[in-house]
Amino acid sequence: MFDIPKRFETNLDIKLKDFIPKELNPNDKRRIKESVRSVKMTYQIAGEEIPSLVNDEYRCQVIQFYEIELENIKDANFIASIYQGLIKPLCIMRFYDSKDEEYSFADKRLSQTEENQIVVEDLYLSQKYPYGLPGEGIGKYLEYLSFDKIKNKTDKLVFYREWFYKLYLLEHKSAYINTELLLSDNVWYSESQAIQIYHTFVELVKAREDVTKIHTNADKIIANKEIKKIIKKFENWRRNI
């Protein structure tokens, strides 16, 4: 997964009974038991090769990678929404069944009101990829997403976010003609610029989706003007990099 170096490999099998917290309601427990076939923590990026971030808002000391085999990939969204809120460290989850695979990312911070609890600020489940077909899965994006291609190693949070943000841009690259140039630029060395790029790209994707639902020409003209304003932000950023 993402060409993670072997030194971070764990390959820890997790028993299903240990994977299902007691505090979940009976319906969720039952659905998890019916949906999940196996769970393995495949990698854990620990130590200070990539510095940890520990402060009042974040406790990012490891990044974990899970492989979760499902009876049917359609349950990936349900499982991801539960476990990204339960697993405190930053993590990437790979869900797969006999045909497809999907990837889950979540940006998390410490709760400011409940001790030892986390808040999921942003949750993203990737598109489906055919499982086991060379060139058709997530591997086609390794030019941008492999471990060695992640540029900002300031700390584990910005490292993880770069993975998260770049996957989102790649999966929506048709929204902006120069997406791949943006992915290759040095903007990723700046944490604040990377955050701006991602949130503006989310705004652009939504604007393009919304314009397809508009039926009057007048409203389409207004919506397309807004899209051009958003695209101009990217062009200005690229000129200033």
Image (spheres, rainbow, N blue to C red):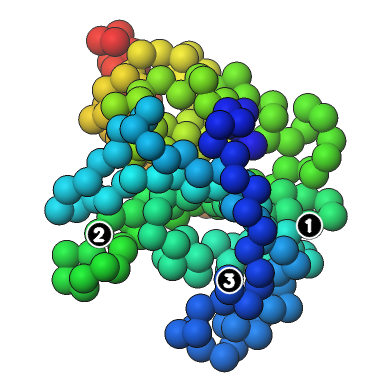
Q: Which of 21 and 6 is in front in this view?
A: 6
Q: Which of 184 and 214 is in front in this view?
A: 184
Check disc 2 and report its element: helix, strand or loop. Answer: strand
Residue 153: image location, x then y, percent: 35, 25
Q: Identify the mark nearer the N-term, 1 or 2.
A: 1
Instruction: Identify the disc placed on residue 19.
Output: 3
Whether pointer 1 and pointer 2 mark residues with C-beta atoms closer than 8 Å, the reply is: no
The mark closer to the camera, 1 or 2, is 2
Residue 173 visible? The answer is no
98 to the left or right of 198: right
- Tell me if residue 25 comes above or below residue 206 in the rendering: below
Residue bearing the label numbered 1: 97
Q: In which quarter of the image is residue 68?
A: bottom right
Q: Which amino acid does label 1 sit on?
A: Asp
- Tell me if residue 39 comes above or below residue 62 in the rendering: below
Disc 1/disc 3 C-alpha distance (Å): 18 Å
Q: Quadrant of residue 241?
A: top left
Residue 120: image location, x then y, percent: 36, 59
Q: Which residue is drawn at 22% across and 46% down?
A: 54
Q: Nearer the viewer, residue 186 or 234?
A: 186
Q: Which residue is drawn at 27% across and 51% down?
A: 59
Residue 21 visible? The answer is yes
Disc 1/disc 2 C-alpha distance (Å): 32 Å
Whether pointer 3 and pointer 2 mark residues with C-beta atoms closer than 8 Å, the reply is: no
Disc 3/disc 2 C-alpha distance (Å): 22 Å
Q: Identify the mark nearer the N-term, 3 or 2.
A: 3
Check disc 1 and report its element: helix, strand or loop. Answer: loop
Residue bearing the label numbered 2: 110
